[in-house]
Amino acid sequence: MTITPTGEGLRRALDGPFHDLKMRWRNEVKADDIVRHTDMSIEEARVWTLDRIKRLTKNEFVTAGFPAAQGGTGTSAESVANFEMMAMGDLSLTIKSGVQHGLFGGAITNLGTTWHHETFLPGAIDVSLPGCFAMTELGHGSDVQSIETSITWDADTSEFVVHSPSPTAAKAYIGNAARDGRMAAVFGQLWVDGEHHGVHVALVPIRDEKGNPMPGVTIGDHGHKGGLLGVDNGTISFEHVRVPREMLLDRYGGVTEEGKYASKIESKNARFFTMLGTLVRGRICVGGGAASATRKALSIAVRYANERRQFRQPGLGEEILLIDYLQHQRRLLPDVAKAYAYGFAQNEIALQLQRILDADGSDPQAARELETRAAGMKAALTRWANDTLQECREACGGAGYMSDNGITLARQDADIFATFEGDNTVLLQLVAKALLLDYKATWGDMDLAGTAQKTAKLLGGRFLERTTARSVIDRLVATANRKPEAEQLRARGWHVQMFEYREKHIVEGLAQRMRSAAKTKTFEAVNATQPHMIEAGKAHVDRVVLEAFIEGIEECQDDYIKTLLVKVCDLFALSVIEENRAWYLEHEVFDARRSKAITSAVDALCGELRSQSLALAEGLGVPEEWLVHPRTAVPPLITPGRRVDEAPEAAAS
């Protein structure tokens, strides 16, 4: 595989600390190993997906994040990078691995003890023990604390009794349930001697070795879905199913040999959130997987725009390339810029995950910050993915609607990413609540002015210090403030100030409203703040992503690539400011003249980056041979290998 030097430099920068790992994927994994043909039936897709996940496991491509003693081959941060690479091939395959390794295996790893690791992890890793993550129920999804399934201790037999007390208690949408799963990590309310201890997880066999449901276990098949046909989602319900005491994943609480409940965490709420916090990797992976699928669609759409011609210039015979039209540049290039921004942010959150795991619980504050960032990033990336996949489809016209083009499959598969691993609306509210949490206690009896001052101080001193690029950003802000107004639009320090101001102002206003709502203690008052909370979450994520992009540029060692990335970062920042210019105008942050200047600057940046569009597509990191299935005839006007030896400037001429 040959790409341009510029494309290679961009790829290396965007891969960051995971470059060697990702290059192993590109060099060793063939398209047939990872790209599903679009005409498969449900059963064919399920067979293909299970077969390919076993292939990748055998070659140690998806075994990171597990203890080495049980067959793990890398860190949890590397497991996130593996997930992102898999998503550039096929999302059914990605989610199948996510269920098997990330959720089922992750539950055993993070909630179990050494005995659970030794007994079950080898099978979970090599897929000889296909597993399910049975959390969601028909009646409860995001509200996990209210699930109905019960796990009741029977002291007479030293067993737990797992039961679904009503039809709405059936586990629903569960991956691996309909066809392949042999065991499930079942979330349920734990009862010991009549006392409720909150949500816990038990390992429950659901099928025997011949694939038949175990006694008391009823399994359903969700059948055809809006996407992810290779994942066998189904329902599971339990009728007084008994499992031995040892099957409870009891790292944070369980029943002793004497039949008594014991936990190092006294509070049920604290125990619940500690348990869920250990599963944050799944949320990080979902955001990264959605972004990877979008990178693939952008790679296809940008290549198409550099080949497809439409209409002639007056007096000239040659038709005009789509990418030469400003509106087409605007359709694609700002999203290419976001792809880079989100890529750098994903690298940082993966490393943050590893730092938290290495600390082994010694820094609970950092763990809470990771959960907040993971929630916000997942919401932002999956929303952007769904919007951008549709834009890429439209940008390819009729060719984009052909299944073999590759975009329609990714579009339907990525749809569900907006709601699984946490509904995006709920997650953004979670982010907003976290932003308020650390200074809620300081409100006291202060008036609104005092609340605003305290809020601003805490935001300025607390939340804006979290980034590892703070010193660089301070320098950029100081430099921007010395520039004449006419030059500030392209100053990254000014971009940072705009992002920070939006976040601080929105959260400050939210704090005031929440303080008032807290006094009334009514549902209506709190409910009225929800749209405000969503905007606070979005503003926070935008700022975090920009800072990650700035840090990624700072770490780039190639001066030419760094210069190009600065332009891409400018396009990202100005595009986000332009998208939110109504807010800035309403709050008199800048006037209509500057608003128009921002639009002109976005237009200019699109024109400047047009000649590098193919190299930017290459830098997104999707191997060209993964863009279409190897047995597919290359769709008309999409020939990924046409220009691999040409420089971007030559291709643009």
Image (cartoon, rainbow, N blue to C red):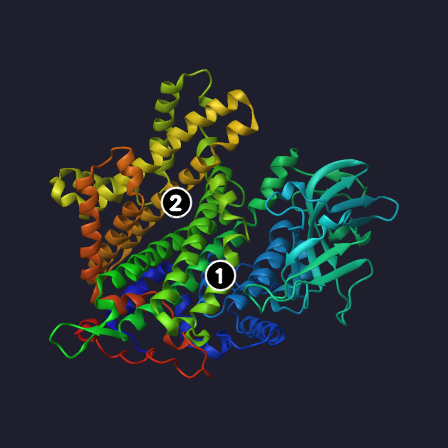
Side of 327 where 435 appears, left or right: right
Distance from the alpha carbon under mark 2 to that under mark 1: 20 Å
- Badge 1: residue crowd in 10 Å (few <14, some 14–19, many ≥20): many
Question: Which residue does the image show at 52% across and 32% down from the upper left?
Answer: 527
Q: Which quadrant of the rendered structure holds the N terminus?
A: bottom left
Q: Which residue is mark 2?
A: 541
Q: Which one is nearer the viewer's eye here, 216 or 245?
A: 216
Q: Amino acid at mark 2?
A: Val
* Kind of residue at badge 1: Ala
Image: 651 above or below 247: below
> Is residue 106 among the parts visible in the rendering?
yes
Tell me which residue sits at (45%, 61%) in the image. 81
Relative to the observer, which residue lies in front, 223 or 241? 223
The one nearer the camera, 621 or 551, is 621
Assign the C terminus to one quadrant of the image.
bottom left
Residue under the image location 25 percent in, 58 percent down: 565
Tell me the residue at 47%/27% (across/down).
Answer: 514
Q: Position of residue 240 (x, y in %)?
A: 82, 51
For mark 1, give the secondary structure: helix
Instruction: Looking at the image, tell me whether mark 2 or mark 1 is earlier in sequence order.
Output: 1
Question: Which one is closest to the eye, mark 2 or mark 1?
Answer: 1
Query: Is 302 placed left or right of 419 in the picture?
Result: left
Instruction: Identify whether 106 is placed above or below 152.
Output: below
Which residue lies most toward the front here? 314
Q: 512 or 94: nearer the eye? A: 512
Judging by the rendered image, the residue that carries numbered circle 1 is 414
The reply to whether dot 2 and dot 1 touch (C-beta < 8 Å) is no
Task: Let me know if residue 351 appears in the view.
Answer: no
Q: Position of residue 235 (x, y in %)?
A: 69, 58
